[in-house]
Amino acid sequence: MSQSKVSCEKCGVLFTQSDEVASTKVLCPTCLAERRAQLRAQKQGAAAPAAAAAAPAAAARPGRVAGGGAAPAKKERAAQRDHLDVRKLKEAESQKLMKIAWGVTGGIGLIMGIILLFVKMSHTSKAEHDAARAKWINDFKSYLAAVNQENVDAIDAAHKRIENEKRPNPANPDDVSGWLGSEIDSYVKTVSRTMASNKDKVLKVAGLVTKLGDYERQLNASPSGEALAKLYNELRAAELQGQATDAGPSHKTRYEELRRKASNLYIDALRSDADKALASATSGEGLAVVGLLEQTLQQIRAEAGADAELSARVSSMLVKLMTESDTKVTALFDEAYIQKQPWIDLFADKNSWLLANSGSSFNHTFGAGLVLKNPKGEDSKSGGLSYTPADKWFDYVLEIEFTVESGVVNFYTRVGDAMDTKMCPAFTVGNTGKNNLSIELGKQYTLTVTVIGNAIRVTGGEAVVPYEDTTIGRTKSRWGEPGVVAQANVEIGTNATITKMRARKLR
């Protein structure tokens, strides 16, 4: 039979119940025995006293039942063993639960205490880390702000530290450095770029100081004319001038003083050589230094700017030189000298001609000479060309063979910055009545153009009235190449052909 623990409906004691059903109620063995005794007593009615007395005695001694059988006594003893006090059991269970609860509470309290201690320690550690981090950022910014921007070593050291402290050291958990990606990221990058730029400037200034010192030593060492020419040109270089300007006022002032000194020494040396040439030269080549001095003086005067003292000195030298030079070349380049000089064919190399004053309507072609065309119309604009190999020529003679079909042609000599009659010696040919030389359209002419010193003379035999201008030296270009322009004409346009153009170079 299977057995299970149940609670007695009468006394509440837990007991082991067998599968045998002895009552409609669930009763422990003791209560069941009492129930049975009561039932027997009720059935027997007025039983003998001995039997009535025996029933309670039997009930008082478990394990003994009427008849003295061993089985009921055995059941009673088992019932006594299983007869538990529910209240004590509940108290014991309650005490056990309380112990467990207190243990759990104590454990939770201990854990919470540990957690709180850890959190407190973590908060303290984070606060200390944040404070150290803030201090590092402040110190790092202060360091960068204090870097000497004019010292290359200091800039290099700062760049090295910027690189080294870009990120925290992974091997050191307490490292609070690292600007990359932080709130000072942009600041550090800006400072780094500024320092790189300043370093470049410092190095350039250092190079400039070295150069200027070297130039100063050379100028103080009584250099030759050739060395002075080199120093003069180098000190005028745009790159060096730009470096001096960028380096600041003191360096620029020193540069300008050296440049002025080189200019004065150079023109003095040229003046000495020019004096010798003017006194003894018998050819145009012998007067080359005179032309070089004139070009140098014009250049220095144009660049003197606010340097009034230098400008005045150069202007005075230039006026004197031009007068002396004009006197010399006019006497030297007589007809006999001119006839001895070889002709130079200006059409031999078509690539030597440079398009200038090129109006959109103008066009030209080289074939059996040079054909110039500038159609009539509202959009007509003057255009022409110049012979660039002669850009440094001073004195020369031109021979020009041409025919004008319509319009007006301008011939220029000593073309400088622009082909403009106000800026360089020139003359016009046409039949409008407003030209320097009047010609018949469609007829071929040959002109001789002589440019010597301060005068230009144009002759063309009996068919042309000579043209002369002896004032060009003071107001117009003193050197430059020949050029030709086909004038714009709204009504008739300009068409011309130059079949020959050659020159005798004199100086």
Image: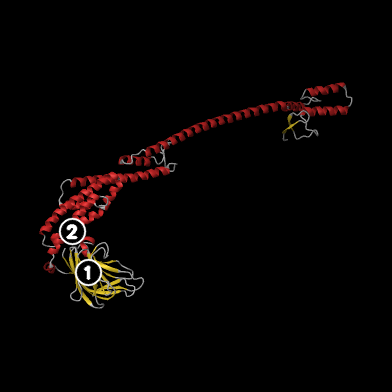
The answer, for residue 412, to whether it is visible in the render is no
Q: In this view, does 15 lie above or below 316?
A: above
| Mark sitting earlier along the chain (1/2) | 2
Residue type highlighted by circle 1: Asp
Measure the alpha-carbon separation of dots 1 and 2: 33 Å
Dot 2 alpha-carbon crowd within 10 angstroms: few under 14, some 14 to 19, many 20 or more: some
Q: Where is residue 16 in the image (x, y as percent from the top left)?
A: 73, 31
Q: Quadrant of the N terminus?
A: top right
Question: Could you tell me residue 319's position as x and y percent?
Answer: 19, 57
Q: Which of 166 and 423 is in front in this view?
A: 423
Q: Which of marks 1 and 2 is in front?
A: 2
Rendered view: 467 above or below 49: below
In this picture, is 454 found above or below 81?
below
The amino acid pointed to by label 2 is: Met
For the residue labelled by badge 1, is the local secondary structure a helix, a strand or a loop?
loop
Q: State which quarter of the image contains the C terminus.
A: bottom left
Instruction: Check residue 394 in the rendering and tell me which mark sits there, or answer none.
Output: none
Mark 2, residue position: 322
Point out residue 93 in the picture as x, y percentages from the top left corner.
67, 28
Q: Which residue is drawn at 82% across and 29% down?
A: 36
Q: In which quarter of the image is residue 397?
A: bottom left
**Residue at the (11%, 58%) spot, across then down:** 279
Question: Element under label 2?
Answer: helix
Q: In which quarter of the image is residue 146?
A: top left
For this view, does 356 lie left or right of residue 79? left
Residue 429 is situated, as x and y percent measured from the top left of the image, at 25, 72
Q: Residues within 10 Å of mark 1 (few under 14, many from 20)?
A: few
Q: Which of 311 and 12 is in front in this view?
A: 311
User: What colour scheme does the image use?
Assistant: secondary structure
Marks counted in the figure total 2
Quarter of the image holding residue 338? bottom left
Q: Residue 349 carries which label?
A: 1
